[in-house]
Amino acid sequence: MTAIQMTFSNHTLAVLKLGLPLVGGHLAQFAIGMTDTIMMGWYGVSELAALTLAGSYFFTIFIFGTGFAGALMPLVATYAAREDETSVRRATRMALWLSFVHFMVFLPAMIFSAPVLQLLGQTEEIAEMAQRYLRIAGFGMLPALGVMVLKSYLAGLEHTRVVLWITVAAAGVNGLVNYALIFGNWGMPELGLEGAALASVLSTLAAMILVTAYALVKLPQHELLRNFWRPDWEMFHHVLRQGLPIGLTILAEVGLFTASAIMMGWLGTVPLAAHGIALQIASATFMAQMGLSNAATIRAGNALGRGDAGHMLRGAQAAVLLGAIGVAISVALFLLLPDQLLGIFIDPEDPLREDILQIGRYLLAMAALFQLVDAAQALHLGLLRGLHDTQIPMVMAALSYWGLGVPAAYLCGFVLGLEGVGVWLGLSIGLASAAVLLGVRFWRLGASDLMQRNG
């Protein structure tokens, strides 16, 4: 084996070693929302539709705030490569500050969500049910954002295994509390939607306690809480400049899927429920790509700190190869086992089960179509963020998702009459555009140029 082949193999193994715990952590985090969906699907179709809507609304606001955590990961990786522990501490603290500001700004949008949802075309009944969920779940946004920041801090320092186990513990707490409070098991009151919301808040608080304790005990040299309330405006604005474009980029993508949920709501309760289930399944497999994207971000940030463009490019090639393998597995599952995957989420005795399955089969076939482009755009966004390149990718992504994806979803779904399949076809078109633009920026502009601009 040649030196180059060995180097590529070493990079592949390094991405796997770093990425697999992150994949597991994303899957465990995702399991919290999936558990809500499965149990609410067993509880009732109307409640499932309301949860789908409320979850999309919550996630849209929440994910915007995670831009500061997204900025922190490559910053910590870069500072760690330069052995600049003071900057690691400063950046982490200010990312926490910015997360708190985000929570305070958007909490009212959770508490008074029903009028907004009705303006977006949802029925009064479903909007009111969604608001009941959000008035509880909204208060969990603060610890959830804190968890994201501290997990990014730990991942940037390559402490990825603990990120996995803390998230697994939170998912376990959520599942148990869901079972007790949604259905009224173990002597608990039957709270339905409100029970699912309360379970999510409690599990997030448990994760916040665990991740904070680990950071303070295992990494005492960073003294994260010492003089925590003292402002550091220089670093505050630096994290803001890096994090805001990332947040807006993620918001544009999630907004694309939220818009699709709203359009599916126009088609009725059953299509919306089928959309929620199919999207949960597609999102589960996408967690592998998110983990690889995070690993690519960390490796790129580390390479930037050392000024090693060759390391950057070989790591990028390894991440793309692993992403392609993951896509092949996902596509096979969607096309070969649609009923088995969809059936997990629906009560066998539900009279609407067959109607949901029929729509869901078509949606999973469309999900197989966009897996490749979705993975490609996620990996290239991760690589560009690792090089602290966030502003132009933000513009590229926003134009793809909203300038092309949303209009295409409406055109295909309603003007051409393809309904749910057409809405998902529009998603694929927007994601494909982003994949092409971001890929061209990274590979044609080249890591050397980007490192020189942002180093």
Image: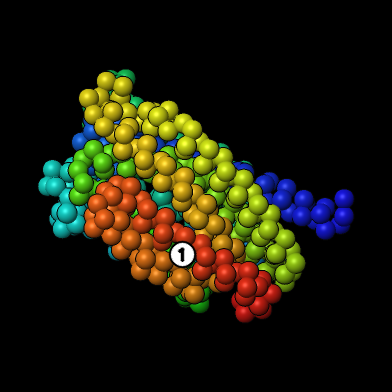
Could you say which is closer to the camera, residue 108 or residue 225? 108
Query: Residue at left 37%, top 53%?
Result: 425
Q: Is residue 54 visible?
A: no
The spot of residue 158 in percent (x, y) is 65, 52
**Badge 1 local density, few (<14 within 10 Å), some, or many (20+)?**
many
Q: Disc 1 marks which residue?
A: 433
* Residue 50 seen by the camera: yes
Foreground residue, 104 or 360?
A: 360
Q: Identify the residue at horizontal 26%, vertical 48% (top origin).
A: 419
Is residue 2 toward the left or the right of residue 199 in the image? right
Name which residue lies at 21% across and 40% down.
269
Q: Quadrant of the C terminus?
A: bottom right
Please provide percent x and percent y for residue 162.
59, 43
As drawn, is 389 to the left or to the right of 246? right
Give the structural element (helix, strand or loop) at label 1: helix
In this picture the colour scheme is rainbow
Q: In this rendering, would 149 be left or right of 346?
A: right
For residue 403, what is the image quadrant? Answer: bottom left
Q: In the image, residue 10 lies at what x, y percent?
A: 77, 51
Q: Amino acid at mark 1?
A: Ser
What residue appears at the point 66 percent right and 60 percent down from the top-left corner? 316
Q: Determine whether 154 is above or below 268 in the image.
A: below
Residue 280 location, x and y as percent?
A: 39, 41
Q: Residue furthest front?
A: 416
